[in-house]
Amino acid sequence: MRGYVLVAPYADLADAARARTRRYLPPGLELVAYGALRLGATLTLPELDRMRPIDAMSSIRDAPVLVV
């Protein structure tokens, strides 16, 4: 891999999921969809709230990073 491109990075995955549901779903349905995603994440990804792109940046070495 020669480099990374981060498009609209979010503070954490929960913020990213919330922004995506708001963007692509009508009001009301986006709340239900986000709630379902959070419930599913609680069961399958208990560490979801600790997964942050900024924490992974320290593992990127010797590769350029473009933040858009």
Image (cartoon, rainbow, N blue to C red):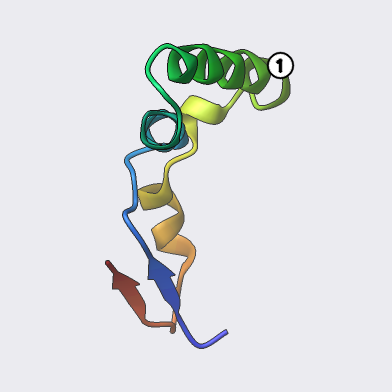
| In the foreground, 59 or 43 | 43
Q: Amino acid at mark 1?
A: Leu
Q: Which residue is mark 1?
A: 43
Asked whether 24 or 63 is in front, the reply is 24
Point out the residue furthest to the front here. Answer: 26
Callout 1 crowding tier (Cα within 10 Å): few <14, some 14–19, many ≥20: few
The quarter of the picture where residue 42 lies is: top right
Q: Is residue 37 left or right of residue 12?
A: right
**Residue 55 sits above or below residue 11 on the image:** below
The residue sitting at the bottom extreme is: 2
Answer left or right for 55 relative to 45: left
- Quadrant holding the N terminus: bottom right
Residue 49: where, in percent of width, then height?
A: 47, 26
List x then y, in percent, for residue 22. Answer: 37, 29
State which quadrant residue 26 falls in: top left
SS assignment at label 1: helix
User: Residue placed at 62% from the left, 13% from the top?
Assistant: 39
Rendered location of residue 17, percent (x, y): 46, 33
Of 1 and 23, the residue lying toward us:
23
Q: Residue at x 46, y 36 (%)?
A: 13
Is residue 46 found left or right of 26 in the rendered image?
Answer: right
Residue at 58% over, 27% down: 47
Number of numbered discs visible in the structure rendering: 1
- Residue drawn at (54%, 19%), measured in percent from left and top? 33
Looking at this view, name the residue that lies furthest to the right: 44
The quarter of the picture where the C terminus appears is bottom left
The picture quadrant where one finds residue 18 is top left
